[in-house]
Image (spheres, rainbow, N blue to C red):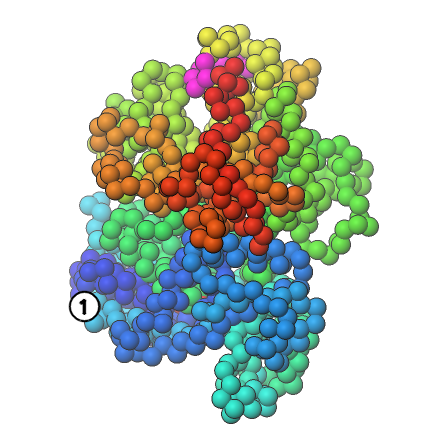
Amino acid sequence: MKSQARVVVIGGGVVGVSTLYHLAKKGWSDVVLVERHELTSGSTWHAAGLLPLFNMSYSVGQIHKYSVKLYGELEAETGQNVGFKQVSNIRLACTQDRWDEYMYYAGVAETIGIDVKVLTPDQVKDIWPLCNTDGLLGAIQHPDDGYIQPADLTQAFARGARALGAEIYRHTVVNAIEQAASGEWTVKTDKGDITCEHVVTATGNFVRQTGDMLGLDIPAIPVEHQYIVTEPHPDIVARQKQGLPEMGVLRESDASWYMREENGGLLLGPYEKGAPCCYIDGPSPDAEYELFQEDLERLEPHIETAINRVPAFGEAGIKKVYNGAICYTPDGSPIIGPAWDRKNLWLNEGHSFGVTAAGGAGWQLAEWIVEGEPSIDMMGVDPRRYGPYASRNYLIEKNEEAYANVFSVHYPDEERAAGRPLKRTPCYDRMKALGAVFGSVYGWERPNWFAPQGYGFDAAAIDADRPDVLMKENHAPVAEGELVRELWSFRRSNYFEHVGNECKNVHENVGLLDMSAFAKIEVSGSGARAWLDSILANRIPKKRGRIGLCHMLTANGGVRSEFTVYEHAPGRFYLVSAGAFERHDHDYLNKLCPTDGSVHLSPITAQYGVLVLAGPKSRDVLQKLTNADLSNAAFPWLSGKMISVGKARAHALRVNFVGELGWELHHEIEMQNTIFDALMEAGAEFGIKPFGIRAMDSMRLEKSYRLIPRELSIEYSAYESALDRFVHPNKGQFIGRDALVEWRERGANWRFVTLEVHGVTDADARGSEAIYLGDELIGRATSGGYGWRMQKSLALAMVRPDLGELGQDLEIKILGKRYKATVIPESPFDTENERLRA
Ligand SMILES: Cc1cc2nc3c(=O)[nH]c(=O)nc-3n(C[C@H](O)[C@H](O)[C@H](O)COP(=O)(O)OP(=O)(O)OC[C@H]3O[C@@H](n4cnc5c(N)ncnc54)[C@H](O)[C@@H]3O)c2cc1C
């Protein structure tokens, strides 16, 4: 065994071995893998080997696509047959909502380049003659999809990696992972130590123990997953004898199971409600090829629906039930990327579709390690999308929920209930009493919208068993006995007009929004300004009290993070960024921070609340509470100062994300309710009302304000995202500057545009829709919705650069239907920002 290597990968499941292979492929041959038992002795050996391409996430979709393509080529490269059967995958739809989901997904797939076909029930019957098509609306099919032998796939990766110089040490247990002050890692095993530059963990169900060794609470815990294999069935055996093709993988999404042929019989894999987390603190040291006692009771409802759909399933005897551990995270996506707070430590954990994801996950992680950056946007799988709030017991609740919802309809406005409410701002109860319907981001409860007094639901008109019910327990009844019941949908739903009324009130009077979830950090020290200048693309405001919008770019000139920067005291800079990216953004700052003591970082998210006061009457309201001069001359747009607000004080920043006159009031958190009450009281005569994130989102679309990771992404250069006025290549060096200059010379691949979508009556774009010129796919929507102030359906999009001129007519496909879309000016509402400057 080597005592030194460039990279040590821990874990010889399909994910770890793929990572090793891809590192070697990138030219790093001095890489080793350590596995405690045999390769695949963890979760990999008992996987059903399905390779579902279907995924609503742009990141994960691209990862799966890469895998499936690679798996078709591996045998030719390595000589190892991987048992890849490209038998296709059919997903059935029985409800309109399911159909909408598929049509939405078809847009994601099309923009990623994944082939999806639409099938009628008769076409399903042709392909799957054993399937009863009663009650089917239709189906979608992935022709490239299929299944593979996970152990053979792992061996193919191992062969490929070894051929490129990588080494694999089996029966070697990692007992400790330590980092020296120099940054060098030591991986301590029962066979000796290996020092290295980088460590990758891919430890599957052992992730909690790995986390303990590292002192990191890695947000993954496995859940039990079962599948049933039947004895051969005469009809299938007969088909085989006739040389007929396999019928492919069948997914009955509405009954939450998949099925495929297996050795002349059938294999049924349900995602049951009530499947428990397992290995909560990790498996026992001697665990290998481990299965749990099957739980047939949990499988029963699925067996019933499976027999109904495929009667042959009920006719074949059960041969074996597998019940194994499958690793989960709260959102069901894996954890791929750098660990927080540690340099050169990489996580490839939490894989629930690990056989499918292994290829792409190994590929992108290897790029990240070797080249410093992945080439696809990995925000959806970045380990830092979770914060310290994702603790053990929270994970148990969330992961069981994620597992149970693998097949639920993935509505864009879905808000899941488990583990909530978790993080609450002081004004939570006040918002709740005002009818707040909360959403959750990064553990924080944030009002999505407000149900007005008297709003309830007509119990008779709504199917109480539908799963799309907002957590009843999570907010107050709006009137005696009346519960707010939000219907999730891909279309305009029952909260639509109430969001419209919130926008109207912000536009005509004044609204109050709780944005305390913002991530906040203070940067101070003698070198603070120079350091910020060297990492951010915009000029750091020279004058104290001025506010700058500053982006941190990748070395390739893409956009990594966005900060509002405000020097609130001499040499002390207050940086605000999106709440969801607190750990992500702060980790980058931490890792870039000079170690000579010249710069000091103080994370202060939880110390400061933020109340946003916005609307033409916001000055009147705030002026009643402060002695500060709020006139335009004394307090212009994009400036900030500490002011008194009633009995309290706040840093008032004259910025907002809705395009109206207004201030963000950043205040000591314990003063929040004092400020909240004072604003509501002072604002009563001006018609103040609270508003939520959905109204904010509608208004930000009308201002063409970009969001990470939608319009801003590591995949688009800052110029492609039209950030020209925030990027100053002439100010001196900063991260991404040179690449950006080159990018400008090379020319853009994309152009950011704002689109008006014509003829929409009930389904606005949501982001990820395909955009065409004639039959040519020329772009993708990144966001979309209804602009209430403009009374127009809008989309933000990235399109081919020559098609971004004002007035250009294009088409956008929303839920399977094409609509005309015209390029309109950026910031179509109040293009000159007169209302912001008022
Ligand atoms: C019943 C069932 C069916 C499934 N079906 C599918 C499917 O159809 N398609 C799909 O894509 N996925 C499926 N999965 C999920 C899939 O099995 C996993 O996502 C995948 O195998 C994860 O691979 P991995 O490499 O991350 O983990 P593992 O295969 O568990 O590998 C982790 C390895 O790390 C080693 N290790 C851990 N700690 C240490 C240490 N300290 N020192 C040394 N070595 C260590 C372990 O021994 C283990 O071999 C299924 C899972 C189950 C349970």
Q: Over which residues does the magenta segment extend? A: 636-647
| Residue under pointer 1 | 165
Q: Decide if residue 163 is on the left or right side of residue 393.
A: left
Q: Quadrant of the N terminus?
A: bottom left
Up the image or down, 67 lies above or below 777; here it is below
Q: Decide if residue 551 is on the left or right side of residue 508.
A: left
Up the image or down, 466 lies above or below 497; here it is below
Up the image or down, 37 lies above or below 473; here it is below
Residue 390 on image: x %, y %: 49, 48
Q: Decide if residue 178 is on the left or right side of residue 412.
A: left
Seen at 50% across and 18% down, the residue is 834
Does residue 629 show up?
A: yes
Taking the magenta stretch, the answer to whether it contains residue 641 is: yes
Count up the numbered dots. 1
Taking the magenta stretch, the answer to whether it contains residue 627 is: no
Does residue 603 show up?
A: no
Q: Nearer the viewer, residue 418 or 465?
A: 465
Q: Quadrant of residue 430?
A: top right
Up the image or down, 764 lies above or below 529; here it is below
Residue 833 on image: x %, y %: 48, 21
Seen at 28% across and 62% down, the residue is 22
Q: Residues within 10 Å of mark 1 (few under 14, many from 20)?
A: some
Residue 287 on image: x %, y %: 42, 72
**Amino acid carrying mark 1 in the image:** Gly
- Quadrant of ligand 1: it is bottom left
Seen at 53% across and 73% down, the residue is 249
Seen at 26% across and 73% down, the residue is 77
Residue 508 on image: x %, y %: 63, 21
Q: Nearer the viewer, residue 766 or 587?
A: 766
SS at badge 1? loop
Q: Decide if residue 30 is on the left or right side of residue 756.
A: left
Q: Nearer the viewer, residue 423 or 543?
A: 543
